[in-house]
Amino acid sequence: MMTYEEMYHAYQKLEAADQIRNLVSNYCFEHNCALQMRYYRNWSKREDIRHEMPWGNTTGHRNLEYNNPWHDVVRHPDDAENMKGGAMFIHSTTTPVIEVADDLKTARAVFLSPGFEGIAAKKMGTWANSKYAYEFLFEDGEWKVWKCRIFPVFRNDYFDDFGAVAEEDMTKKKRVGMEDFHDFFRYGTDVIMPRNEPDPPRPYDTWEPGWNFGTD
């Protein structure tokens, strides 16, 4: 039979996992209506926060400042008002695997993310499927995002066969001020998919470096 302390510890881990699930889901809803900038209030205040994207990686609070140059404005630069046309970003998250450290100080999670995007002014519609890896910190009484890495699966125009899409040249889209980025993965007849990344987290006692991120 579990002791009271063991039951309370198990409850804390379940509560943490539920808060983390809601944290990531809130981003999906904010992204849907081009309010991604609001999500950065949910990031840690530490200087080693890490955001790894297909088009560039950023470390530290300059990540937040770079992605939100207006500081007090939460609208994405590609929102409908700025583009003079409609914008739609649907990136849901499914199939979560969440592990909270036994010391209750950090957590790890991975998600599948099927999605599609539409920008009316550019007459553009695309499928954009990815996988996410996250690390979280318990900071100031709340769970905060510490690290996030997006693993692209495929991205193609709405009417294209995703099995025949050529590899996207992301070097032309690398943003100024961002660090080197990892390869943009493609789905095709000459590659094997799914590649086994990110590695789903396994139970762990306390945080150690070396899980799914280029820099720890």
Image (cartoon, grey):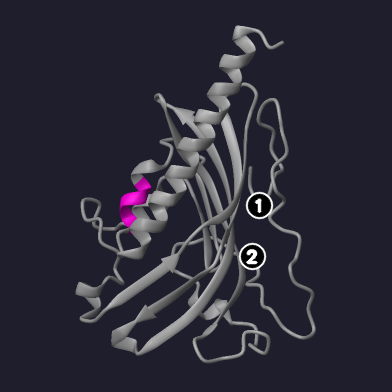
Percent x, y for residue 214? 66, 52
Is residue 202 placed above or below 189 in the rendered structure?
above
> Residue 207 falls in which quadrant of the image?
top right
| Disc 1 element | loop
Where residue 214 is drawn, which disc sits there? 1
Disc 1 and disc 2: Cα gap in Å? Answer: 9 Å
Percent x, y for residue 142? 41, 29
Image quarter where the C terminus lies is top right
Where residue 182 is drawn, which disc sits there? 2
Principal secondary structure, stretch drawn in magenta: helix
Does the magenta portion include 37? yes
Side (left or right) of 114 relative to 125 = right
Where residue 50 is drawn, which disc sits there? none
Percent x, y for residue 181? 59, 64
Does the magenta portion include 216? no
Is residue 216 placed above or below 92 in the rendered structure?
above
The reply to whether discs 1 and 2 touch (Cβ–Cβ < 8 Å) is yes
Work out whether residue 153 or residue 61 is closer to the camera in this orientation and state it. Answer: 153
Which residue occupies 53% across, 23% down?
12
Crowd around label 2: few <14 · some 14–19 · many ≥20 (10 Å): some
> Residue 2 falls in which quadrant of the image?
top right
Image quarter where the N terminus lies is top right
Which residue occupies 71% across, 30% down?
204
| Disc 2 element | loop
Work out whether residue 210 or residue 156 is closer to the camera in this orientation and state it. Answer: 156
Residue at the extreme front of the image, as rendered: 1
Percent x, y for residue 154? 61, 75
User: In the image, which residues are magenta?
Assistant: 36-40
Q: Mark 1 is on which residue type?
A: Gly
Is residue 4 placed above or below 158 in the rendered structure?
above
Q: Work out whether residue 199 can be spotted.
A: yes
Q: Mark 2 is on which residue type?
A: His
